[in-house]
Amino acid sequence: MAKNLIEIEADGFSCKRKEDICFLDLNQNSIGILTRRDVKDQFISTLKKIDESKNIRGIVIANSPTYKGDLELKNLLAYFSKVFRSRIEDREVNLFQHATSQVIDIFINYTKPTIAAMRGDIGEYLFTLSLTCDFRFATSNTLFHFPSIKLGLPTPGVMAYYLIQYIGRQRATDLLLTKTSLSASEAKDLGLLNGVTENENLIADCIEKLNVINQHPSHGIAAVKNILNPNSSDVTGIMNKAFEKFKLNLYTMKNKGD
């Protein structure tokens, strides 16, 4: 633990504060954060402390150079293969679903502006987290990966929900059924990114956006976010539907491997 309750160095992420902005750095892929209960609890606790702080006016969430987005789904399947080694355990899938729901619910109800800053290879689950943020910036070499469909698994439900909200059902369907990756420029053209920049300018662009937003009263910002953000129940509905398909397809994959 660092100087105050908000600054933290954890196994999977770190949080630093600079003046009235917090920088959350993900150094482990999000599957590792969600499937390790101790790390997940630290992550959620840190997010809550930031939102409750009267001295913090925004948060930037970035993936560090050590983040391996292309390992997200592999790590998830490896995690469940251990669980399924002797018999199927619905409880573990349900725990992962609950952890995902907890994190998404926090971002839906967050009162402070949130910005995702992405670089390199971004997996489905970090991309999903970014979609729940208010703004998204990426470097020109960023590549978003959607490998689930190649493995016969459903797209994360939260990602599907937000894609429909941002780009419409038809374009979301076309994207998820015909592409397994998306470049930063393609994502920007679709309206999924607020800006594409070079690596050295990524954080500065995020700070500039926060400075513009924070010219307004914090209670006004929170009110706008509350109006624009979806209801948690709407997101939970499609997420539960996706997880039911996820569990069903895991059964199928396991049985084929037996």
Image: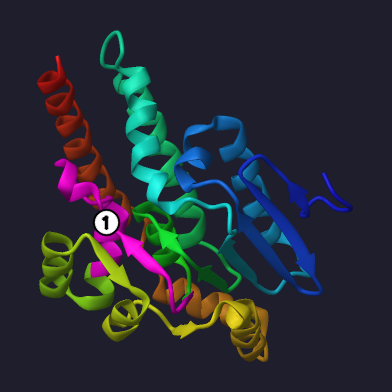
Residue segment shown in magenta: 136-163
Residue 59 among magenta residues: no
Is 120 on the left or on the right of 153, as rendered?
right
Q: Is residue 230 visible?
A: no
Is 174 on the left or on the right of 144, as rendered?
left
Q: Quadrant of the C terminus?
A: top left
- The single residue placed furthest to the right in the displayed view is 3
Q: Residue at x 45, y 61 (%)?
A: 108
Q: Quadrant of the N terminus?
A: top right
The image's colouring method is rainbow
Q: Label 1 is placed on what type of residue?
A: Phe
Q: Is residue 108 above or below residue 35?
A: below
Using the image as rendered, state which of residue 57 and residue 252 is in the foreground.
Answer: 252
Q: Is residue 231 above or below residue 197?
A: above
Q: Residue at x 89, y 53 (%)?
A: 3
Q: Residue at x 51, y 55 (%)?
A: 106
Q: How far across and how far down the image is residue 214, in percent? A: 66, 85
Using the image as rendered, state which of residue 40 and residue 11 is in the foreground.
Answer: 11
Q: Which residue is mark 1?
A: 146
Q: Is residue 237 above or below residue 199?
A: above
Q: How far across and how far down the image is residue 246, in percent? A: 21, 37
Q: Quadrant of residue 74?
A: top left
Residue 138 among magenta residues: yes
Q: How far across and how far down the image is residue 161, in percent? A: 26, 61
Q: Residue at x 50, y 60 (%)?
A: 107
Using the image as rendered, state which of residue 1 and residue 78 is in the foreground.
Answer: 78
Q: How far across and how far down the image is residue 237, in percent? A: 25, 49
